[in-house]
Image (tube, grey):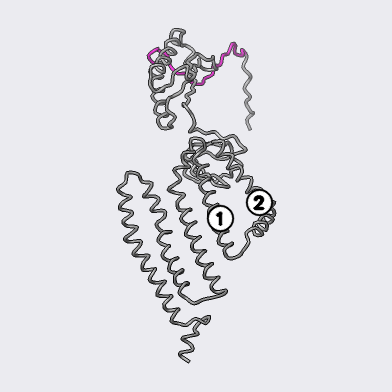
Amino acid sequence: MVKDVWENGLFGIDIGHFIVAVFIFFAFLLLRRFFARFIIGRIKIVTKRTKTVIDDAILEALEKPVQFIPVVLGVFFAAEYLPIYGGIEVMANNFVRSLIVFVIFWGLVNLLNPMSFLLRRLEKVFTSSLVDWLLKAIKVTFIFIGAATILEIWGIKVGPILAGLGLFGVAVALGAQDLFKNLISGILVIAEKRFNLGDWVRVDGVVEGTVESIGFRSTLVRRFDKAPVFVPNSKLSDHAVINFSSMTHRRIYWKIGVEYRTTVKQLRQIRDAIEQYILKSDYFAKPPKVSMFVRIDRFSDSSIDIMIYCFTKTTEWGKWLEIKETLAYRIKEFVEEAGSAFAFPSQSLYVETLPTEAPEIFVPPAA
C-alpha cells in the first residue's frame, strides 16, 4: 500500500517527483536572494559611478520584476521535471507563459516612470498635466495588453469580451453623462492651457484658490483658508476662469481726494510729485510697456479727486502689498508738503432766512 501510494500519489505521479519538484522550486527561490544581493547589488555600484541618474532610476524600476525571474524559472523547471501529460501539461505551460507575460509587462509599466523624461519634452507644446494624463493612459494600455495576452494564452477570446463591454459601456454612458462630460471638459481645460498646477485661479461664483491637482472628473482647488474644493471639470470649462498667476504685472488703481481749498498750484505739485516717484521707482513698470496715469480726475461731492493708475513689476501678492504701502506713505508726504490735506465726506447746510414769527406755545390748563 505504501508503495502504491508512493508511485501513484497525485494525478498518477509518484510522490518522489513532487518532492524533487518542490526542492527545485525552493532552490530557485534561494537563487533569487543570491541574484538580488550579489548581481543586482554589483550593478547598482556600477550605475552609481556614472554621472547620469537615469540608469539608477531604470535599475530601481526593473529590480523587482528581475528578482521575480528566478521564481518563474523555478516554476518552469519544476513543471518540466514532473512527468505530466495531457491537460495538466497544457495548464502548466499556460501558467508559465502567463508568468512570463506578467514579468514582461510589469517591467514595462515600471519603466514608464524613469523614461517619462522623454515625454516631459512635450511640455514645451502641452501642459505638464496633459503629459501626466498621457503617462497614465500608456500605463493603462500596457496593463490592458498584458491582461489580454494572458487571457489569450488560456484560450479566452478578448474580442467578444470587448464587444460585451462596448454594449455595457453604452448603457453606462446613458446614465453617466455627467462623468463623461467632466472627463472631456478636463481634457479641454488641459489642452487649452487654462491653468497649471500651483496657479492661483478664480471662477466667479464657484471657487478661488490654488490648483493642486487636475483629475479625470474634477480639479482640486485649495482655497486661501486651506479648505480643499473639488470642482467638476465642466464648471471650469463652461465658466470664465481668471488665472492670476499668468499676470505680467499687478495693478494699483486709486482715487485720492484732497480738500476743495487746495489751489491749482498745490494740485500740480502733488500730481507731479506722485508721477515722478512712480517713474523713478524700480518697483513700477514704465510706459509704453504698461499704461500709467496720474491725473486730476473729477470734482466729487466733498473732494477734488486725483486718479492714480499704475502697475508693479512683481505679481507676488505680499511684495505688491509692500510696494503699495510705500506708495501710500509717499502720497501722504506729498500732500502734506504741498500744504494741502485729504478730504473727508462732508455736507454744508445754508439757511437764507429764519421764520420771523414763532408759533405760540401751548400751555395745558391746570387741573
Q: Which residue is mark 2?
A: 176
- Looking at the rendered structure, the secondary structure element under dot 1 is helix
Dot 1 or dot 2, earlier in sequence = 1
User: Which quadrant of the rendered structure holds the C terminus?
Assistant: top right
- Seen in the picture, residue 226 relative to 249 is either above or below; the reply is below
Residue reaching furthest to the bottom: 1
The residue under label 1 is which amino acid type? Ile
Q: Give me the disc on residue 259.
A: none
- Seen in the picture, residue 20 relative to 194 is either above or below; the reply is below
Please report the bounds of the magenta region as a residue range: 336-356
Relative to residue 195, is residue 161 drawn left or right? right
Foreground pick, 249 / 154? 154
Label 1 Cα neighbours within 10 Å, binned few <14 / some 14-19 / many ≥20: some
Relative to residue 218, is residue 51 drawn left or right? left
Per the image, is 343 magenta? Answer: yes
Relative to residue 358, is residue 110 drawn left or right? left
Q: Position of residue 177 (x, y in %)?
A: 66, 48
Residue at 48% of width from left, 87% of height from top?
5
- Seen in the picture, residue 265 relative to 204 is either above or below; the reply is above
- Looking at the rendered structure, the secondary structure element under dot 2 is loop
- Seen in the picture, residue 13 relative to 4 is either above or below; the reply is above
Per the image, is 310 magenta? Answer: no
